[in-house]
Image (cartoon, rainbow, N blue to C red):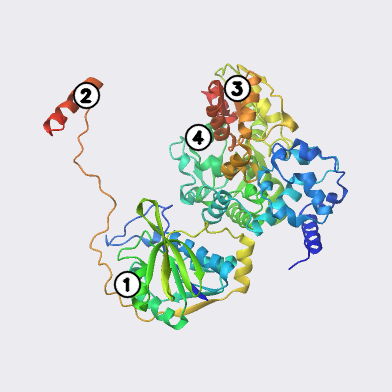
Amino acid sequence: MVTTEAAVHSFYDKVLAATPHGEQLRVCLECGNCSGICPFGYLMTYPPSRLIAMLRADRFNKVLETDTVWMCVSCFACTAVCPSKIPLTFGLMTSVKEELLLAGNVPAELQTALANSQRYGNPQGESPRKRADWAKDVKPQVTVMAQARRPVDVLWFVGDYASYHPRVQSATKALARVLNALGVDFGILGPDESSDGDSQRLAGERGLFEILAEKNGKAFSKYQFNKIITTDPHAYNAIKNEYPQLGISYSVQHYTEYLIERLDQLKSLLKREVKAKVTYHDPCYLGRANGIFDQPRALLEAIPGVELVEMAHNHTNSLCCGGGGGGMWLDGFQWEKAHVRMSEWRVREAMTAGANILAVACPYETPRFEDAVKSLNGGGRLIVKDIAELLAEAIG
Amino acid sequence: MNIVALFKLVPDLVEELEIDQSGTALNMDFLRLIINEFDDHAIEQAILLKERSGARVTVIGPNAEGADDVLYTAVAKGGDQLIKLMGGDSDAMVNNHAMARATAIVLKELQPDLILTGVQAHNDLDGSMGPLVAEYLGMPYVGYVSGVNVQNGRIVVRKEYPGGLIAEMEVDLPAVVGIQSAEQPPRYVTVNKVRQAMKTAAIEERPLPALDISGGAAIHRMFKPESATRAEMIDGSAEEVAARLLDIFKEIGAL
């Protein structure tokens, strides 16, 4: 049995060692900003600032007896607001989740997603062989690297939800149409692609993340391409910021970044008017975590007829859809604790902003916001679309 | 107390099943095997018993693709001893009589107090493993069990009946129990814990004697569900369809 003090120190050491700038944990001011800005902080027994206080008071064991840290959706809001620049999301919160997972204190629905990721390479438990099935009826035919056996300019890392989720597949097909219209030479990995693993990592399963990253690294190394683009901000974050630490280094862009570099060519294709008031939801892992705010907005403004309006929370201050850090697989657990959905808060904001269309750029969001629209009174008038879908519509 | 948990590996239904050229078996080339879900619950129940009442848990399974993963995962969960049964081909794997006879020989040597296994598997063609193993060992068997407790050298099991009825019954040991579900869902163990187990645990390989396949099912034909031709599709407008339906109801005497 480890003494309490030893457990505290080993946890401190663990966070310090595993996180760049982890030593910042020692300079917490206890200002409480993190717990205040946390969308579910009011439901946590130990929101970030209190977690740090518990560590300092030598009472971390108490934390391991609670389960409300699983309300954390790794939305990065606490990290963005911290005046001491403490890596709260990647360091503290993720490390606490790792400890809870080791202690077996983990909601059953999250276990299922992790077990599926381990076995099938995707959290949904779909057949890995069917990963490219969305592309079956796309014309011209989408290049699957293992079959084409030729170099491509752009390797498109499609991601789990963009590959398998029936609603998100329509956004995936739309992006394929946009890329084809631009004449991009692109290919996908299909069955060679595994989950990027980022949300699993942020849900505390570091070892699983490493296995998935290694599989993707192996797949990348089999083929020739100039750069990677991805539909999924979580994949973007993993490949850009985490994979290099495992020796897997590739240049990667989110599709909005990639398209903005071709804006002039794209503009000449956007012939059809999309007459709508559009508001844009900043995905946590595109905006707050990686600073991509302007490109998605510029794409929307390039569509004739679109009037862009902002919600109350925008840019760095954007509200999470509730899907990050394992939230995608904790809906039941979080509903039991909160009796509210984060996605509903966001949809209400979009309605208040007077938008007809809520535009998104992350595959977690379309189904989450559409579900919220269905469950909200008067929400039925709001349409949820991926930016790729709006672009494809404007191309006609 | 010595507890043995037995597991089978069965075709993973996430992938499409194909029938091989012989027309009597599944095409193994396109199959992935996965632990029989009920057996996963049997392992969980064994670990729960160990945590609650103290026990030594031995996990036994066939030598097939994926068996090592199941075994190392079981150790990461708290299992003590791992045994892989070597020999037997894919035909034998769908013959529970043969597997149960062979497993019984190993079990006689181990002399466990309690044997837990899944109550059924989706590829059982000739009855489930539990009752067959019990028969070959001359032990009592209780199936459809969703909870086990040790009490004064015996076990008390919760057995499920149709209609939501649950019976608690005492069973003398040694006994074989067919697990319907463990008291909690099988736990998730992290990849790092399983990797650790791979470094420290050893899988004992036990050769199986020549398999006696008598009593098993002889497969004459294996086929996917075929659509029958009895249904009549009624075309036309709603009125036409309704009129035709009325005629049919009258014809068969329903109206």
Labels 4 and 1 share a subunit = no
Q: Residue A167's mark?
A: 4
Work out whether A230 lies above or below B164.
above
Helix, strand or loop at disc 2?
helix
Residue on which disc 1 sits: B97
Give the SS element for disc 3.
helix
Q: Nearer the viewer, mark 3 or mark 4?
A: 4
Residue receiving disc 3: A268
Question: What percent of the width, then of the height, locates residue B180?
Answer: 42, 59
- Tell me the crowding category of disc 3: few under 14, some 14 to 19, or many 20 or more residues within 10 angstroms, Cα based: few
Q: Secondary structure at mark 4?
A: helix
Q: Chain of mark 1?
A: B
Report how far apart the C-alphas of labels 3 and 4 lie in the structure: 28 Å
Q: Which mark is residue B242?
A: 2
C-alpha separation, residue under disc 1 versus residue under disc 3: 71 Å
Which quadrant of the view contains residue B145? bottom left
Front: mark 2 or 4:
2
Same chain for mark 3 and mark 4? The answer is: yes
Q: Earlier in the sequence, mark 3 or mark 4?
A: 4
Q: Amino acid at mark 2?
A: Ala
Give the residue type at disc 3: Ser
Same subunit, labels 3 and 2: the answer reads no
Chain of the residue under label 4: A
**Chain letter of disc 3 in the image:** A
Gap in angstroms between the C-alphas marked 2 and 1: 54 Å
Which label number is shown at residue A72? none
Q: Chain of mark 2?
A: B
Contact between marks 2 and 1 (CB within 8 A): the answer is no
Residue at the outermost front position: B152
Find residue A48 and report its horizontal and vertical position in percent: 77, 45
Mark 4–mark 1 Cα distance, whole angstroms, equals 47 Å
